[in-house]
Amino acid sequence: MKQKIKYKKVLITGVSSGLGYGLAQSFLEQGIKVLGCSRRMPKGLIQQGLNFCALDFSDRASSLPIMRQWISRAGAIDLLILNAGVLGAIKDMQASSTEELKATMEVNLWANKWFLDACLSEDRPIQQVVGISSGASLSGSRGWNGYSLSKAAFNMLIKLYAGECPNTHFTALAPGLVDTAMQDYLTNLPADERYSPLEVLKKAKGTDDMPNGYRCAQKLITIFPKLLNFESGGYSDIRKLEG
Ligand SMILES: NC(=O)c1ccc[n+]([C@@H]2O[C@H](COP(=O)([O-])OP(=O)(O)OC[C@H]3O[C@@H](n4cnc5c(N)ncnc54)[C@H](OP(=O)(O)O)[C@@H]3O)[C@@H](O)[C@H]2O)c1
């Protein structure tokens, strides 16, 4: 391993459920300071010591000033995990309005830009940024419209920031299948031969191929330091790193 890192303070977006909740819980259990944000309040995590701020990634105008105030007291951050995200509806591109696609882009792409800009300002040292991406950023499966578009652009956002921030290491990381609210939506959709990944997801649900947010977080936490061995700005998939 080329670089070693000891995480003392971690900032995670999207901590109210799923993977973000699991990551926050796992770090708190290790005695690491965790700051987290989402719209809903994760009461269980706050009881465990989470420093929480309610933010809406679809509403930059009202959330950015609140976020700036919150982050101004944070000091140095060892690891920033950009995890908050939305899926949008699975349907054909021609059935999707530009407004729907823009709404997904707002949360999955543009909110990460203003969030990163605010975090990187004031010369705040941030050692590592991990953007939670998805295999959908590459696959372009029919029906995954705004999600695939936004995650593909998110991979590039991570690469572009890496190019201008040499003191911070960036990765776009696909976490594999995680049994969360997103998968509840997908696996409850009726079988539809147009959207072939649905069959794979339905089969994986309830098996080791789709761990819950906490179990996936436990795996990711062992992988984050290893990402530092790769060139900053790249895309990795946990399924390839484990294998
Ligand atoms: N589940 C999978 O199989 C899978 C696979 C690949 C990648 N991912 C990625 O993993 C990440 C976490 O997703 P998940 O599966 O854990 O889904 P989830 O349970 O739905 O969690 C999404 C999180 O994002 C937050 N969020 C959504 N909209 C937001 C907004 N407008 N403002 C602030 N926060 C917002 C949610 O908080 P609030 O609703 O409280 O705001 C929640 O905490 C996402 O980036 C997703 O794309 C998931």
Image (spheres, rainbow, N blue to C red):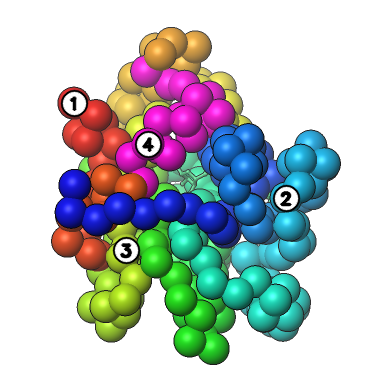
Q: Residue at x 69, y 44 (%)?
A: 16
Marks 1 and 4, how far apart at CA: 14 Å
Residue 98 visible within the image: no
Nearest to N terminus: mark 2 or mark 3 = 2
Assess whether residue 212 is covered by the magenta stretch: yes
- Front residue of this view, candidates 170 and 9: 9
Does residue 113 appear to the left or right of 222 in the view shown?
right
The numbered mark at residue 243 is: 1
Question: How many other residues sit within 10 Å of disc 3, few (<14), some (14-19) or many (≥20)?
Answer: many
- Front residue of this view, candidates 119 and 2: 2
Q: Residue at x 55, y 62 (%)?
A: 107
Q: Which residue is mark 3?
A: 170
Going by the numbered disc 3, the residue's amino acid type is Phe
Q: Residue at x 17, y 61 (%)?
A: 231
Look at the image and give the residue range highlighted in magenta.
209-224
Going by the numbered disc 4, the residue's amino acid type is Thr
Q: Residue at x 58, y 38 (%)?
A: 30
When asked about the image quadrant of residue 24, the answer is: top right
Residue 178 image position (x, y, % from top left): 46, 29
Marks 2 and 1, how far apart at CA: 33 Å
Does residue 166 appear to the left or right of 145 in the view shown?
left
Marks 4 and 2, how far apart at CA: 21 Å
